[in-house]
Image (spheres, grey):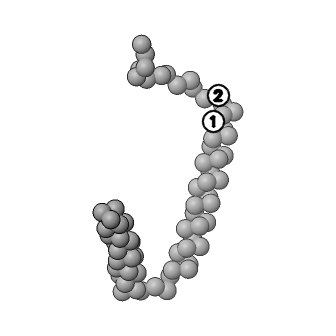
Amino acid sequence: MRLFKKREKAPLSTGQQAAAQRIAEKLISGQKRLAGYLNTKTQGISGRGWLFLLIGFCLLFGSYCLQLILRAWD
């Protein structure tokens, strides 16, 4: 029984490699565009502002997790 044996992967053809390369390039360029957009939107936030946002985020989701835990006991 070869239930857990690793299967050998067939090598990709040149057409498949080219298609995968184009897809990867489009994904990376989209990620770079989105990162640039988000960087320009958050450029004006100071270090103290980021700290308050982080503390607020942790408090918000920490209290939500605590609520889920407490509701599990009821």
Residue 53 - label: none
Q: Three-letter amino acid code at disc 1? A: Gln
Residue tagged by mark 2?
13
Which of the 4 quarters of the picture holds residue 37? bottom right
Q: Residue 22, position in %: x, y? A: 66, 46
Work out how far the residue at label 1 is from the one at label 2, CA to CA, in angstroms.
Answer: 6 Å
In what quadrant of the picture does the C terminus appear? bottom left
Q: Is residue 63 left or right of residue 17?
A: left
Quarter that holds the N terminus: top left
Seen at 56% across and 80% down, the residue is 41
Q: Are marks 1 and 2 in contact (CB under 8 Å)?
A: yes
Q: Residue at x 43, y 23 (%)?
A: 6
Q: Quadrant of residue 31?
A: bottom right
The correct choice, above or below, for 32 with respect to 48 in the image is above
Residue farthest top in this picture: 1
Give the percent coordinates (x, y) of residue 72. Answer: 34, 62
Which residue is disc 1 drawn over?
17
Q: Position of residue 58 (x, y in %)?
A: 35, 74
Q: Nearer the viewer, residue 13 or 6?
A: 6
On screen, residue 16 versus residue 42, left or right, reads: right
Secondary-structure class at tag 2: loop
Amino acid type at mark 2: Ser
Residue 21: quarter of image: top right
Query: Which residue occupies 57% across, 63% down?
Result: 32
Judge left or right: residue 5 versus residue 21: left
Q: Position of residue 65 (x, y in %)?
A: 35, 67
